[in-house]
Amino acid sequence: MRSLNLIFALAALGGCTSDQMASAIVKPGKYYIYNCDQIAATGRSQVSRERELKVLMDKAGQGPGGELAIALAYRNEYLMVQGNLRELEAAAVEKNCKMPWRTESERAVQ
């Protein structure tokens, strides 16, 4: 966990975006060995967790010291979930799998 915090601190100082940090924490090809059913199930659970974390971050952001609470409690996991979703989508595209965790409008953009 300390190494993740160090990565985020260095990225913040270096001007990295959230997208770059999310990609940096998740191993490329992490879901390559998954089949389509496993990709779909994992995608649904990751989207669910992403929504939970977003609600928690929004709630924490309303109080005093909210940004600090978000950074300490939720930001790392939120970025990891986003990175996982990117890797799942890459694996789904490569294997020509459906992505049931994405809405129709999100699918149309791809």
Image (tube, grey):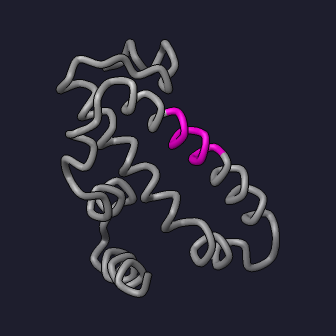
On the rendered structure, is 14 left or right of 61? Answer: left
* Residue 100 shown in magenta: no
Image height check: is 108 above or below 28? above
- Dividing the picture into quadrants, the one containing residue 39 is top left
On the rendered structure, is 56 left or right of 107? Answer: right
Image height check: is 47 above or below 97? below
- Dividing the picture into quadrants, the one containing residue 33 is top left
Q: Residue at x 33, y 42 (%)?
A: 86
Q: Position of residue 58 (x, y in %)?
A: 71, 55
Q: Residue at x 40, y 17 (%)?
A: 107
Image height check: is 46 above or below 105? below
* Residue 48 shown in magenta: yes
Q: Position of residue 11 (x, y in %)?
A: 32, 75
Q: Position of residue 69 (x, y in %)?
A: 68, 76
Q: Residue at x 32, y 33 (%)?
A: 89
Quadrant of the image containing the C terminus:
top left
Number of residue marks: 0
Q: Position of residue 54 (x, y in %)?
A: 64, 51
Dominant secondary structure (helix, strand or loop) of the stretch shown in magenta: helix
Tell which residue pokes out farthest to the right in this image: 63
On the rendered structure, is 28 left or right of 83? Answer: left
On the rendered structure, is 25 left or right of 79? Answer: left
Q: Which residues are magenta?
A: 44-51
Image height check: is 4 above or below 24? below
Quadrant of the image containing the N terminus:
bottom left
